Image: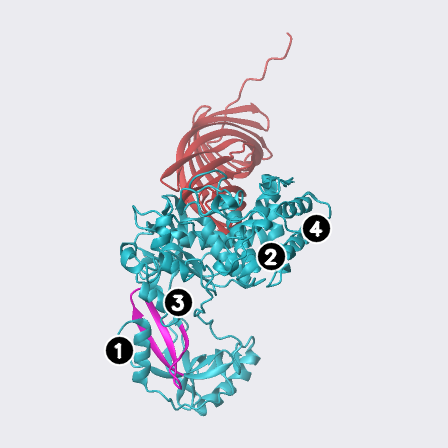
Chain colours: A red, B cyan
Amino acid sequence: MLAAAPAAAQSWPERVHISVSGAFQATSNDFSDRFEFERDLETGSTEVDYPVKSGFLFDAGAGVRLWKNLGAGVAVSYFTRDDAASTTSSFPHPLFFNQPRDVSGEATGVKRTETAVHVQAMYLVNPGGRLRLVLSGGPSFFSVEQDLVTEVRITETYPFDTAEFASAVKSREKGSAPAFNVGADVMWMMTPTFGVGGLARFSRASVDLDAPGNRTITVDAGGFWAGGGVRLLF
Amino acid sequence: MSRHEWSPQWRSVFQSTLAAGALLSALWLCLTSTPTSAQQAVRGRLTINPGSVAEVRDWAPRVDSLRRSGDLRLRVRREDLLVRGRTHERYDQYHRGVRVFGADVAEQLNGGQVVSVFGDVYDGIDIDTSPAIAADRAREIVAGLAGVEVGRTPELVVLPHEDKFVLAWLVRAAMPGDVREYFIDARDGSVAFDYSDLQTQSAVGRGMGVLGDTKKISVSSSGGQFVATDRLRPPAINTYDMRGDYTRTILYLNEIIQLGTGDLGNDGDNTWTDGATVDAHVYAGWTYDYYFKRYNRRGLDNRDLPLINVVHPARRSDFFSAFQQVPDFYLNAGYYGDGVMVYGEGLPPGLTAGGQTVDFFSAALDIVAHELTHGVTQYTSDLIYRNESGALNEAFSDIMGTSVEFYFQQPGSGNLRADYLMGEDVFRPGGIRSHENPEAFGDPDHYSRRFTGTADNGGVHINSGIPNHVFYLAIEGGTNRTSGLSVQGVGAANREQIERIFYRAFTQMLPANATFSVARAATIQAARDIFGANSNAERAMTQAWTAVGVN
């Protein structure tokens, strides 16, 4: 024999398991937007680059063993970040046609919140000893709240050949979308009911947000994340 | 603008008026009324603006003392609707029973305790409060000024004004498009002060010029319409539409009447279609912009003197009946002093002068800039408007007019293009003067050919051709047709250098009675000052003056 045969999987005696994890979402979901506006008889424009960088998230879930090693569960993950969006605008000149002023600025405190509910079918693996493994997958439902820059305000003085960024007006838009999730949770039980675990999951959605000017912006949410936390078995 | 070349038939038609010199005099130094600024640094003014509780406590008894003496009288008392228990009282200051205009105190009280106090009061008022003229007389005076019946009873007030106090009748007059507060001096019936009480807001409109071009026009919204008041630029730029009433125009220029918001050019939808109004208003703004951006100069007096454009001073359709009375309201534009410009109507369609059609005078950017530059000269060198100094005065206006044109328009020929012709967008085809070839319009290009007669104030519009030609040669280079001397110019790409030289010399160095020779020395010195000795600019200026025979 070249290798020892793996030990046969053992039964999973507990009915319920609970996980609470902190994690790091590795995927960046940067996006950009461009909108136009009328000012001083001409059309101006603003381009906004929104960074949605990787960051920490919180995840909590529970599963129920339904039959043998098969179960079902639900988890909720919550991710939020504040970033600064960079804006580049072209403002028409108040006194002359076709002499726009370029204005760059930064809109701070641009908030992104992702809340995802993951419905999971589970395969519960008990290799023996203190180790447990949960493989899961199923549909997800993402809800995204995103601050969008709807207007850039400037300061300008005569002769108006230049203008300075003053502030950005934001609105918080909401959207939701379905997705899927796959994940694996490895537990190390320190007592029969309490342990720690490491969890990795991939779940990603494209969410439509209403934007100024009756437009729709599609943003990506979620991605791959990994983390760890406490595990409870009952 | 002033000098026009006429065809023989037009010369005879207009001979009498031409002889009067009116058509040729572009600079009429009529004194015009300028709205007096609000009171500043008025004697005895005490501003109550305590910055701490202690200072409030310090002011409270002083205010109370004024109240007890009757110098402060309660105007209104109101409960605070936002903070319970607070009361607001507002007092007016009185002097011997007469209200002091603009003097009041606002107190905030909490259960009798003064929480805050702000205001302005005047100390040391020492005028008699017995009016020499009656209220009805003041009302009649305002009715005459405003052109409307005034029903409201005038109020006798003490007006703090220009470091003194004036007993005045305050009369409010509402007229089409304006509401004005007049202060009629109660001793002699003169207008001590007046201002528009109509609230306005700046707006950007779309204007179509005389030649059909579209541009932005900075105006104001007022009373449900848009009026030609520029509030974006530092000085007030107002364009008044006299609607062809030349009698009223004359009354205004002679300070018999004042113009109000109702006289401003106006438009209902902010898409302006009266080209004469649009061009006068916009081009005055552009000229201000040129001086500001090129020389950091703030208007004619460098203190943002308000600019007043007057368009349609007469009516084109009245040309045959009115031209004899007011030729300059048709075939001229003029700077009347103190920031007032009047732009003529031109000729009715179908008529020509010397084979040229003559359009509204405000249609040409170089004409508008020329007129405004007379204002710059007025407040700087004040070149005397006759003989060589007068020709330098005219030349500087032509030079700056052309410079403004090159600043805002693309070089080329034809309408709305920058070139070395003067007035080519009004006098079509061809314009009325040329920097490049003055002799094409009968003007000398060399000192040896200068006009030495007495007409035209000693040839101010004729001999201007000589320094005008210097400007051209110093930029573009070339050969003077009379002397045959060649000049190496700085090149069109460096036109700004020569503009700066002329501006510096003519605004800062020339005396009022300057000659061409002095202008030569001053411009060469200016070239050295700005660009250094032996610079290309100095060489170009020196060669150019030599080429035109001025040493």
Q: Which residue in the structure is indicated by mark 1? A: B151
Q: Which residue in the structure is indicated by mark 4? A: B528
Q: Position of residue B28 (x, y in %)?
A: 45, 64
Q: Which residue in the structure is indicated by mark 2? A: B506
Q: How dense is the environment of label 3, judged by Cα within 10 Å: few (below 14), some, or many (20 and up)?
A: some
- The residues tagged by marks 4 and 1 sit, at their Cα atoms, a distance apart of 66 Å
Verify whether residue B103 appears in magenta: no
Residue situated in front as seen by the camera: B203 or B482: B482
Residue interval drawn in magenta: B168-194
First-in-chain label (4 vs 1): 1
- The residues tagged by marks 3 and 4 sit, at their Cα atoms, a distance apart of 43 Å
Q: Amino acid at mark 3?
A: Leu
The secondary structure making up most of the magenta span is strand
Q: Is residue B401 above or below residue A214?
A: below
Q: Is residue B445 above or below residue B284?
A: above
- The residues tagged by marks 3 and 1 sit, at their Cα atoms, a distance apart of 28 Å
